[in-house]
Amino acid sequence: MASTITIEVSRYRPEEESEPVFQSYEVPLRSDWVILDGLNYIKNELDGSLSFRWSCRMGVCGSCGMMINGEPVLTCAAFLESYAPGPIRIEPLQHFPVVRDLVTDMEDFMGKLTTVKPWVVREEEKPVEEGEYKQTPEQLADFKRYSMCINCMLCYSACPVYGLEPEFTGPAAIALAQRYNLDSRDEGNDDRMEILSHDEGIWSCTLVGECSEVCPKDVDPAGAIQRYKLAGATSWWKSILLPWQK
């Protein structure tokens, strides 16, 4: 096996380029190195001007998502050896504006997360002296899967609908809404349904399923959206057939 591997990195320096260009680097091909290690080698040893996001190196923070040979992945979870003999082409996550090199603008994504009220909504808070809101293990299991999202944005990069219709609320935000809808402590289901039961919400999803395929935490946003659609359709029919139950 070769001792090095070629990494082709998308470079975009707005003060120098009007469009991204690719720059090639040779990095050591080590069995214990992930792609993020290769990028840090470039940054520390070859070209300190390279810009990219990373933090935990453990698949927890979601910062290091990038396009690797056309697929959205966490670079801290993808070993260099898996891409031998190379080259490895690294680009910023698609469907997002590029700020510099591999750094994308997260403003639209973060804004969409806040629109779905991602917190426990209570019509009336009980006094603190009455203690915490308790849950059974079964109640926790109802929403735990959807609570594992790390905001890595891989699902948005994989979603063809978001690529064509940026107004789409998107997989992670809808899965996050479902996480709170299924929480036994929450009373904000109706509020979120009003926000998401429109063209830019749950009904934009065409169930391609790529969001769930690329999710590093097995959140299954596609499944969450379909459950949301079922709840939305049921709510609509009830409003027509049983209007007095509103």
Image (spheres, rainbow, N blue to C red):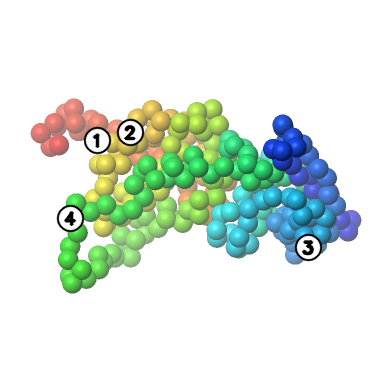
Residue 159 seen in render: yes
Q: Residues within 10 Å of mark 2 (few under 14, many from 20)?
A: some
* Residue 152, percent from left and from top: 55, 50
Task: Give the secondary structure at mark 2.
Answer: loop
Q: As rendered, which of 125 and 58 lies closer to the eye?
A: 125
Residue designated by label 3: 31
Q: Name, please, the residue furthest toward the front.
A: 15
Task: Give the secondary structure at mark 4.
Answer: loop
Q: Is residue 83 left or right of residue 171?
A: right
Q: Earlier in the sequence, mark 2 or mark 3?
A: 3
Q: Image height check: is 63 above or below 160? A: below
Residue 224 seen in render: no
Q: Nearer the viewer, mark 3 or mark 4?
A: 4
The residues bearing labels 4 and 1 have C-alpha atoms spaced at a distance of 23 Å
Residue designated by label 4: 124
Q: Which residue is depicted at the point 43% across and 41% down? A: 112
Q: Which mark is residue 235?
A: 1
Amino acid of disc 2: Ser
